Image (spheres, rainbow, N blue to C red):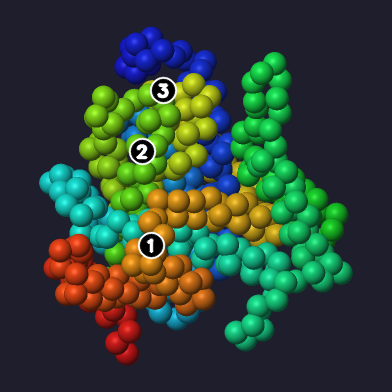
Amino acid sequence: MKKFFDLRANGTNTRTEIIAGITTFATMAYILVIQSSWMTAAGMNGTGVMLATALISGLATLIMGLYAKMPFALAPGMGTNAILAFTLVAGGICTWQQGLTWVFISGCIFVLLSVFKIREKVVEWIPKVLKVGVGASVGAFLIRLSLVNGNMISVAGSSYALNLEFSDPAVLLAWIGLAITLILYFLRIHINGKTYHIRGSLLISIILITIIGIPMGVVSVPSSIITQNAFSSLGDVVFKLDFAGAFIPAMFVYILMFFMSDFFSTLGTALGVAGKAGMLDKDGNLPAIGRIFLVDSCATVVGAACGLTTVTTYVESASGVEAGGRTGMTAVVTAICFFLSMLFAPLFLMVPNAATAPALIIIGISMMQTLKDVDFKNVEWFPVGLMLIVSIFGGIANGIALGLVAYCLTHYARYLFTPSKAKCPNVLTLVITVLCCLQFIK
């Protein structure tokens, strides 16, 4: 292993890589809880989803370590899982089988773009402000969804109200959980001039809230912590794609959304984490980006076939890098942790919404930090602002579609009257806009 990963040349050692791999797993293990919980709400077998999440995340991360030799971990990304469960399925737009088929198609597109190395052209087709806005819109949607699922906000028709009914144990637990999560996530300890934070704070907060929920009567302790009937549970979610029913007008905007989420999330994460590890060249490029894209896109295709939403490279990989991880050995250790978690599915399935909602609120807020890259001049900000607001109350797909329409209208108008100062949206942007608007045809 030392020779294969060339640990000495990368300034690391076996002990450091093992610690880094475990650290990465600790910071992203919450996905095992959230993915199974939300996909259960979509009608899927929760145990099967948890096992598929651990299995595919482990395999994808293992390949990332052995093939790309990078300290990056992969798992189903936050945002697309919420959209599939609570927008597509809950909204009656499609079944979970059809939604996973759209994820599968988006992954196949990503694979083709990775193989033929035309990813850079796709970046040019989507306006920069909207690329930035999509991440923030998904984050805002995630915040609203988490507040509702955690009973922290009550919904009556189209009205929303803060829920402070502390006589309800689930509501009380959610608010206590938010306080615990905020404290652990932002706690900083200064010792001898160095600043330390709690690694895996989101996972630790979920565990603490779940334990507190047991005496409160919110959490039921399973009779066994060992996974049983594993293969039959996996059989309920694996290879259930529905191509026959997937081809409806709404598919285009969701395929685009799944694609954009995976494409730009992977790009940003890879460059950001690699930069933190000092892996970028003198021009700011990452030599291994092609291999990273290929592993990531193949993981989405295989993951969708096995019952998972978009599998992507996790920004939590930065925690392993911060712990000293510099090679693919870090990813291999993280993969082993995922495989071991398959033995204890009941522990992950007992976690209530009140325990996961606070962590998701923090994740959603962090996703909105992409807005810092938006030019807040009216003509640039308006499409993003519209996308953000519509996504919160009308769903991500409607937000993306109306954001694209607003972008084209404002920029075409600006181009017609100030041709020397404005750039006309390209034809491919217009085509994407039209495809996204097909969802409005009933």
Q: Which mark is residue 187?
A: none
The structure residue drawn at horizontal position 66% and vertical position 18%, both measured from the top left corner, is 193
Q: Give residue 273's quadrant in the image.
A: top left
Identify the image quadrant of the N terminus.
top left
Q: Nearer the viewer, residue 17 or 233?
A: 17
Task: Return the x and y of residue 397 as percentages of the image width and height.
Answer: 38, 72
Identify the image quadrant of the C terminus.
bottom left
The residue under label 1 is: 377
Q: Give residue 117's quadrant in the image.
A: top left
Q: Is residue 286 left or right of residue 381?
A: left
Residue 109 visible from this viewpoint: yes
Q: Which mark is residue 326?
A: 3
Marks 2 and 3, Cα distance to the nearest angstrom? 13 Å
For marks 2 and 3, the one nearer the N-term is 2
The residue under label 2 is: 270
Please state which amino acid type lies under the numbered disc 1: Lys
